[in-house]
Image: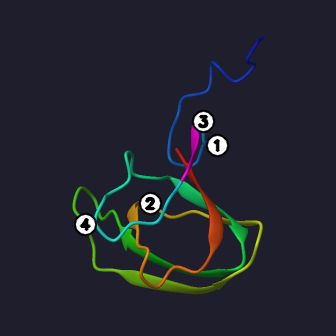
Amino acid sequence: MKDKATHISRHNGSPGENLWPITPSDDADLAFVTRGLYVGGDGDLMVIPWNGGELGDPVPIVGVLAGSLLPFRVARVLATGTTATNIVGID
């Protein structure tokens, strides 16, 4: 399959290339820091942001609607405080 975008350099503003399902966990960081999140089911998220090479403090994101794309770099989606479902990491 041809990819007409191969000449475009990858940067934070470019579309994500990798997607993976996220299972919220209070103990385990994600395999990769995200460039964004997709939320398939309404609810709240509790995330630990990635702040320039180090973990930030947990941050609640309240009232996320199904189908939302969130442009956040996160290292972990916590189980405690997360009620949103069908979360997909984007990188």
Closer to the chain start, of discs 3 and 2, is 3
The Cα–Cα distance between marks 3 and 2, rounded to whole angstroms, is 15 Å
Q: What element carries label 2?
A: loop
Q: What residue type is disc 3 on?
A: Glu
Residue at 25% x, 66% y is 55
- Checking the image for residue 46, the label placed there is none
Q: Position of residue 67 (x, y in %)?
A: 77, 66
26 drawn magenta = no
Q: What residue type is disc 2 on?
A: Arg
- Residues under numbered marks 4 and 2 in contact, where contact means CB atoms less than 8 Å apart: no
Q: Mark 4 points at which residue?
A: 55
- Residues under numbered marks 3 and 1 in contact, where contact means CB atoms less than 8 Å apart: yes
Q: In this view, does 80 lie above or below 72?
A: below
Q: Is the magenta stretch mostly helix, strand or loop?
A: strand
Question: Which residues are the magenta region?
Answer: 17-21
Q: Mark 1 points at which residue?
A: 15
Q: Name the residue under label 3.
A: 17
Question: In which quadrant of the rendered view does residue 77 lie?
Answer: bottom left
